[in-house]
Image (cartoon, rainbow, N blue to C red):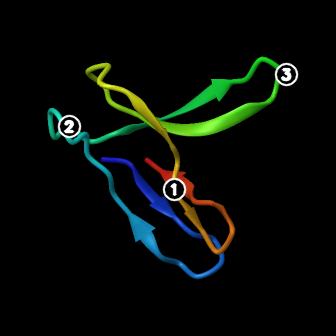
Amino acid sequence: MNTYECSKCGMSVNANCGKCNEPLVNDMLKLDDGNEVQISKCPNDHGKIKSPLCCGQDMTCNV
């Protein structure tokens, strides 16, 4: 399971898909302007979310 951790305060979080209860996997989404955004996605293609934030920044994924 991927764990997301805040590099400032150390808080961590795990996330599962609400439809199939599988752990979300870390990924990157390429935007139309060429930038990339860190996301968490269901391994069974139920969707994706913006990865968690803490202390005003993206939490780092520790696989």
From this view, report whether residue 44 is shown above or below residue 62: above
Residue 47, x across and y down, in percent = 37, 27
Left or right? Give the position of 50 relative to 34: left
From this view, report whether residue 26 is shown above or below residue 12: above
Left or right? Give the position of 1 relative to 8: left
Q: Which of the two residues, 60 or 17, is positioned nearer the viewer here?
A: 17
Residue lying at the far left of the rendered structure: 20
Other residues around mark 1 within 10 Å, as few (<14) / some (14–19) / many (≥20): many
Q: Label 3's element?
A: loop
Q: Which residue is mark 3?
A: 33
Q: Gap between marks 1 and 2, in whole Å?
A: 17 Å
Q: Which amino acid lies under the numbered mark 1 shown in the image of this protein?
A: Pro
Q: Which residue is mark 2?
A: 22
Residue 7, x across and y down, in percent = 63, 71
Q: Which amino acid lies under the numbered mark 3 shown in the image of this protein?
A: Asp
Q: Which residue is mark 1?
A: 52
Q: Which amino acid lies under the numbered mark 2 shown in the image of this protein?
A: Glu
